[in-house]
Image: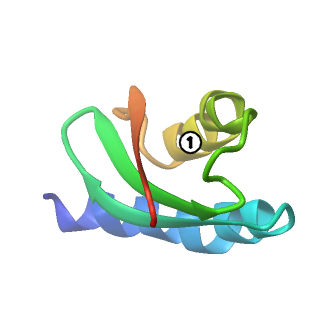
Amino acid sequence: MDEDRAQAIRAVVDAVLAPLIALDGGSIEFVSVSATAAKLRLGGACNGCPGRSYTVERVILPALQRADAAIERVEVELAL
């Protein structure tokens, strides 16, 4: 994992996305980054949320793409 890319994505997750997701009772954390994907862990109210896929596509992915243009998709794992 390229540490500079990981650091940039982690910064967006921690500073921008985590506070936003927390407003609805959810949680988000950075797991890893590959050539074209960021892997994130979602928890709290995100588990079972019917709007989760919309949030990933319309909020999370664009925010990550602004930090790293190579990101094409977000892989989600759910926190138990």
Q: Residue furthest left?
A: 1
User: Which residue is under mark 1?
Assistant: 66
Residue depicted at 31% across the width and 37% down the height: 37
Which corner quadrant of the image does residue 59 belong to?
top right
Which corner quadrant of the image does residue 54 belong to?
top right
Q: Quadrant of the C terminus?
A: bottom left
Which structural element holds mark 1? helix
Coordinates of residue 19 in the picture (x, y in percent): 75, 71
Q: Amino acid at mark 1?
A: Arg
The answer to whether 9 is drawn above or below residue 18 in the figure is: above
Residue depicted at 41% across the width and 64% down the height: 30
Q: Quadrant of the N terminus?
A: bottom left
Coordinates of residue 48 in the picture (x, y in percent): 64, 45
Q: How many marks?
A: 1
Coordinates of residue 58 in the picture (x, y in percent): 70, 29
The answer to whether 72 is drawn above or below residue 47 in the figure is: above
Residue depicted at 27% across the width and 32% down the height: 36
Q: Which residue is nearer to you in this view: 4 or 19?
A: 19
The answer to whether 58 is drawn above or below residue 42 in the figure is: above
Q: Is residue 28 left or right of residue 35?
A: right
Q: Is residue 23 left or right of residue 61?
A: right
Q: Is residue 78 left or right of residue 61?
A: left
Coordinates of residue 10 in the picture (x, y in percent): 44, 67
The answer to whether 52 is drawn above or below residue 23 in the figure is: above
Q: Residue furthest right?
A: 23
